[in-house]
Amino acid sequence: MAYAGIVLISHSSKIAEGIKDLITQVVKEVPIEAAGGTEEDDIGTSIDKIQEAIGRADTGKGVLLFYDIGSAKMNAEMAMEMADSENIQLVEAPLVEGSYTAAVESGMGKSVQEVHDAVVKSF
């Protein structure tokens, strides 16, 4: 079964990886990818990292993007515009709580739109 994937975008690779670790302790089947830090793993975000994470997280059912602060949203939007898939949604929700909720909803086999709507309704 394909699941809506999740990409965690943070200025810190440690934050993105930590959230991924937290979620995958509970939800194991949903593709979750971390896109934290710059290409050199400094503080910042990278469009290339986000695009690569989108590609890994998309198993045919689309991807939801969660972000932390500042330029993370701008780089997420640019990565979406450059992606081949149109089934990508940026979610306006807290990074940790929102992505956790999305993983649970995706694990129930819901579509990207259904997961997006459930997360937005929760916050």
Image (cartoon, rainbow, N blue to C red):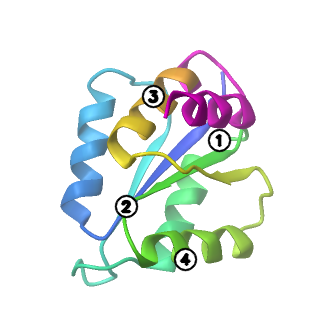
* Residue 92 located left or right of residue 78: left
* Residue 34 marker: none
Q: Which residue is mark 3?
A: 101
Whether residue 108 appears in magenta in the rendering, the answer is yes
Task: Indicate which label's residue lies in the foreground, 1 or 3.
Answer: 3
Distance from disc 1 to disc 3, alpha carbons, whole Å, reads 19 Å
Which amino acid type is shown beneath numbered disc 4? Answer: Met
Which amino acid type is shown beneath numbered disc 3? Answer: Thr
> In the rendered structure, are the residues bearing label 1 and label 3 in contact, judged by CB atoms less than 8 Å apart?
no
Whether residue 87 appears in magenta in the rendering, the answer is no
Q: Which residue is mark 1?
A: 59
Residue 12 image offset from top left, x and y in percent:
24, 67
Q: Residue at x 67, y 33 (%)?
A: 117
> In the rendered structure, are the residues bearing label 3 and label 2 in contact, judged by CB atoms less than 8 Å apart?
no
Q: Within 10 Å of the Cα at label 1, are there few (<14), some (14-19), or many (20+) other Cα atoms?
A: some
Q: Is residue 64 above or below residue 44?
A: above
- The chief SS type of the magenta part is helix
| Callout 4: SS | helix
20 vs 92, nearest the viewer: 92
Mark sitting earlier along the chain (1/3): 1
Mark sitting earlier along the chain (4/3): 4
Q: Classify residue 46 by image quadrant.
A: bottom left
Residue 116 image offset from top left, x and y in percent:
64, 37
Q: Classify residue 61 by image quadrant.
A: top right
